[in-house]
Amino acid sequence: MSIWTADERNAPSALFRAATAALAVGIFISDTATHEDIEVAVLYVAIVLMSARFLRTRGLMAVAAGCIGLTVISALLTPAPISTLTDVANTLITISAIIVTAFLVLQGQSADMRLQEERERLRHMEEDLAHVNRVSTLGELAASLSHELKQPITAAITNANTCLRWLKRDQPDIEEASAAATRIVQDGNRAADIMDRLRSFYTKDTPVARELVDVNDLIREMLTLLRSEANRYAIPMRTDLGFELSRVSADRVQLQQVLMNLMLNGIEAMRDTGGELIVRSGPRDKGQLLVSVSDTGVGLPADKADHIFNAFFTTKSQGSGMGLAISRSIVESHGGTLWAASNPGRGATFHFTLPAAADSDPG
Ligand SMILES: Nc1ncnc2c1ncn2[C@@H]1O[C@H](COP(=O)(O)OP(=O)(O)O)[C@@H](O)[C@H]1O
Ligand SMILES: [Mg+2]
């Protein structure tokens, strides 16, 4: 933050303001009292600079004008009034110094304001992009999801038919019928759970909420969500989860997004070649949790491995190139790191670390 910013965090105390005013009075008195040879008035430049810490355009212009006014008044009141050309020149130099300083300060302030606006705009853009990415990955998941939902719904219909059959008997079997009805309730709940898990994913304005998240639970959830997508290409998915330090303080939805991006990328890399997706978790040094997503697919693009995390970099005809860029910014905003490595054999592995939560021991 530069000294020009007059935002609230940086706003100087009332004491600072009072000191500025007192200094102005001091300069005025000594300028008026001293002989014209000593041009105390140049110190008004300091008043302009100090005011810049708590004043914006108009206020600052008023201060500069005030300083010029005081310079002129002093010049007129000084014991030996303006007589020589030097006196006039001195006063003019002081006035120019005040004007130039005020001008530079104002320029600095408006540049700073523009920078802040630009930063704000970028932040909004980043949020929008993250949302678009989420929605488009969701688009890829639509087929997978309808399959996921169809299962509990089909089961519910079967159980409802069973229930009806028990009831329509000459001797209705209430016990069997209510057992079937209980299963219908379970099926309904299962469908509702799937919907709930997704709702948080596509709404944009879910506030950034850090909570204690068990990354292993999250991995298992993503496995369920992506199962049919993986089945579509006959890609088996496997996990190797460590149980130490598996909890982190994180935004659950954002972490879901990271895992989903990495796992979908892995599945996409094996679309044509087949292979196996493995998700690992385990402790790393210094209280860090390490999560790795490995595939045995086409491998990182040759010579371009540095670029894959850049926004819009994609080697896919339908790709957005946003998945890894967004994933990296999410991981970094959680205090972790995300990187990629080629596997010794086939394919690639994406690793990310997260600081484990303090009370991360299981139990
Ligand atoms: N598991 C992977 N194996 C090989 N290349 C990958 C893998 N994951 C990502 N990449 C490369 O990184 C690029 C950027 O990925 P990403 O940011 O997710 O965007 P997109 O998936 O839309 O292309 C991909 O187009 C691909 O070239
Ligand atoms: Mg992707």
Image (cartoon, helix red, strand yellow):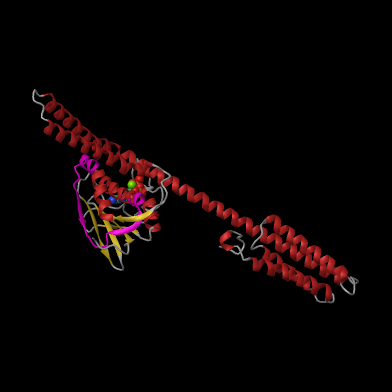
Is residue 84 positioned above or below 326 on the image? Answer: below
Residue 326 in the image: x percent, y percent?
39, 51
> Toward which corner of the image does residue 50 lie, by quadrant?
bottom right
Classify residue 325 as left or right of residue 11: left
Is 248 part of what is drawn in magenta? yes
The residue located at (58%, 59%) in the rendering is 8
Is residue 194 positioned above or below 62 on the image? Answer: above
Is the N terminus in the top left, top right, bottom left or bottom right quadrant?
A: bottom right
The residue located at (86%, 71%) in the rendering is 87
Pick the residue in front: 184 or 39. Answer: 184
The residue located at (70%, 55%) in the rendering is 58
Residue 137 in the image: x percent, y percent?
34, 42
Classify residue 337 as left or right of residue 109: left
Classify residue 75 as left or right of residue 318: right
Is 253 part of what is drawn in magenta? yes
Residue 217 in the image: x percent, y percent?
26, 52
Pick the residue in front: 352 or 22. Answer: 22
Residue 37 in the image: x percent, y percent?
83, 76
The residue located at (23%, 45%) in the rendering is 224
> Toward which corner of the image does residue 29 lie, by quadrant?
bottom right
Q: What is the tally of numbered marks visible in this picture? A: 0
Residue 84 visible in image: yes
Range shown magenta? 227-255
Pick the residue in front: 276 or 152. Answer: 152
